[in-house]
Image: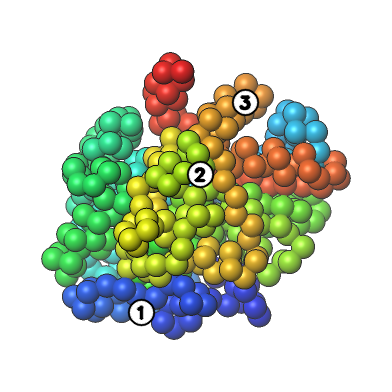
């Protein structure tokens, strides 16, 4: 269900997968055929009521959609300004928004007659979502994961294996998400004929950024309707965390042409703004090519992809989806960043005040939501895309907190 076709900022990408100057396809010749096939298959499927009907049936019956839009009364009181509503993607089956996209791409895999999927994962949520969809559709599945993330996310590694997925440890580079993505791309070049690569965010070569945005737009489409039903109008601001940018794109996209709605993306500020100490790609990066797409990238002085750091494995990535780069340069979305410590504090605050533990990624957006609400009047409304639950992060939060 594509969002309402609209005149200006939302009318992207073009047929070549360009969002203004961003996006496109920077891949070896061997992948071009598979990407063309995927583009055709996705467009046909997305216009086919049988496909979209089944997609929405699975999202309803299996994932548990629509997710609630919940009035967070105690966070609202604490911030002392606008009313705060949480779009509860944490209540989806598997605990985050990633499942929306994994289901969509698994359905496409079956439609293309492929029997095997691979994926990359950071925090393990996309790995778990892919393992889940693979089990549901009877597909073989291998997930690439950096050994540093395997250490931080033991619970998710167990979950994937328990569902019959092979978790492939990646030892190269910083042993995190970027390296896992490199390995998955490398494998795909040799297995592309029978294997589909389920990319977990709005990144990678065309058509992935467009396709993942469309699968995740269910978040924003629901939010819009729920706002109309529950408060009788659109919200004043929508806040989401940005790793690759899929939960943000999913909730932002249906609002892009509603110019009265402020859109705010929150990146990982890590320890500090010093090089290598954060993952704030849009705040400190420059345009370049990473993982098959032209977008903002964190680079060192020699143009090499920089090291990144975030307490949250799902935001620990030096790139960002090309549509976010486009929205940034167009001035449609404001991007900011939040530090590790601020996110850890918000993890506890949200738990204490609402009885809801956010994923560490989500906790970054909680911080900026509190600030944004405080800046606004009591008659205004801020919606926070509550991208995932915190269970996976409890061990890591305990470890980091004990070190202090
Ligand atoms: C993976 C993940 C993110 C970051 O990915 P995006 O593509 O930027 O959405 C954010 N929150 C949660 C809970 C995640 O699992």
Question: What separation in Å lies between label 2 and label 3 (alpha carbons)?
Answer: 24 Å
The residue under label 2 is 273
The answer to which quarter of the image holds residue 189 is bottom left
Describe residue 134's horizontal placement relative to residue 401 as left or right: left
The answer to which quarter of the image holds residue 154 is top left
Identify the mark at residue 205; answer none if there is no mark.
none
Describe residue 338's horizontal placement relative to residue 109 as left or right: right
Q: Nearer the viewer, mark 2 or mark 1?
A: 2
Q: Position of residue 235 (x, y in %)?
A: 75, 53
The residue under label 1 is 40
**Image quadrant where one finds the N terminus:** bottom right
So how many labels did they put on this image?
Answer: 3
Asked whether mark 1 and ligand 1 are closer than 8 Å, the reply comes as: no
Q: Is residue 31 above or below residue 218?
A: below
Q: Earlier in the sequence, mark 2 or mark 1?
A: 1
Identify the mark at residue 349; answer none if there is no mark.
3
The reply to whether residue 45 is in sight is no
Between 304 and 162, which is closer to the camera in this rendering? Answer: 304
Q: Residues within 10 Å of mark 2 (few under 14, many from 20)?
A: some
Q: Position of residue 258 (x, y in %)?
A: 72, 66
Asked whether mark 3 and ligand 1 are closer than 8 Å, the reply comes as: no
The reply to whether residue 122 is in sight is yes
Q: Position of residue 75 (x, y in %)?
A: 71, 31
Residue at left offset 31%, top offset 79% = 36
Q: Nearer the viewer, mark 2 or mark 3?
A: 2
Describe residue 285's horizontal placement relative to residue 113 as left or right: right
Residue at left offset 64%, top offset 42% = 368
Q: Earlier in the sequence, mark 1 or mark 3?
A: 1
């Amino acid at each position: 269900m594509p969002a309402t076709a609209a005149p200006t900022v939302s009318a992207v990408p073009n047929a070549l997968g360009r969002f203004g100057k961003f996006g496109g396809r920077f891949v070896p010749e061997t992948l071009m055929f598979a990407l063309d096939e995927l583009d055709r298959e996705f467009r046909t499927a997305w216009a086919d009521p049988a496909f979209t009907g089944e997609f929405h049936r699975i999202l309803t019956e299996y994932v548990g959609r629509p997710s609630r839009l919940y009035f967070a009364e105690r966070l609202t009181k604490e911030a002392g300004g606008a009313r705060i509503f949480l779009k509860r993607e944490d209540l989806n089956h598997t605990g985050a928004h990633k499942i929306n996209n994994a289901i969509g791409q698994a359905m496409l895999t079956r439609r293309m007659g492929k029997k095997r999927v691979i994926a990359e994962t950071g925090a393990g949520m996309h790995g778990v979502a892919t393992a889940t969809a693979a089990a549901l559709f009877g597909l073989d599945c291998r997930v690439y994961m950096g050994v540093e993330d395997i250490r931080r996310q033991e619970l998710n590694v167990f979950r994937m294996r328990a569902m019959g997925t092979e978790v492939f440890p990646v030892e190269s580079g910083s042993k995190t998400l970027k390296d896992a993505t490199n390995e998955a791309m490398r494998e795909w070049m040799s297995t592309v004929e029978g294997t589909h690569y389920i990319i977990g965010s709005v990144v990678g070569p065309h058509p992935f950024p467009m396709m993942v945005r469309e699968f995740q737009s269910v978040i924003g489409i629901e939010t819009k309707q729920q706002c109309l039903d529950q408060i009788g109008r659109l919200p004043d601001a929508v806040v989401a965390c940005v790793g690759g940018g899929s939960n943000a794109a999913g909730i932002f996209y249906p609002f892009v042409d509603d110019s009265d709605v402020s859109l705010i993306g929150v990146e990982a500020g890590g320890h500090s703004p010093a090089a290598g100490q954060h993952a704030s790609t849009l705040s400190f990066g420059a345009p370049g090519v990473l993982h098959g797409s032209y977008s903002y990238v964190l680079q060192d002085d020699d143009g090499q992809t920089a090291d990144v750091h975030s307490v949250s494995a799902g935001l620990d990535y030096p790139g960002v989806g090309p549509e976010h780069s486009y929205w940034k340069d167009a001035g449609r979305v404001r991007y900011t960043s939040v530090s590790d410590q601020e996110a850890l504090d918000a993890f506890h605050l949200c738990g204490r005040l609402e009885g809801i533990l956010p994923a560490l990624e989500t906790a970054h957006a909680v911080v900026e939501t509190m600030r944004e609400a405080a800046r606004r009047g009591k008659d205004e409304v801020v919606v926070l895309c509550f991208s995932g639950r915190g269970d996976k992060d409890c061990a890591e939060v305990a470890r980091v907190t004990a070190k202090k």
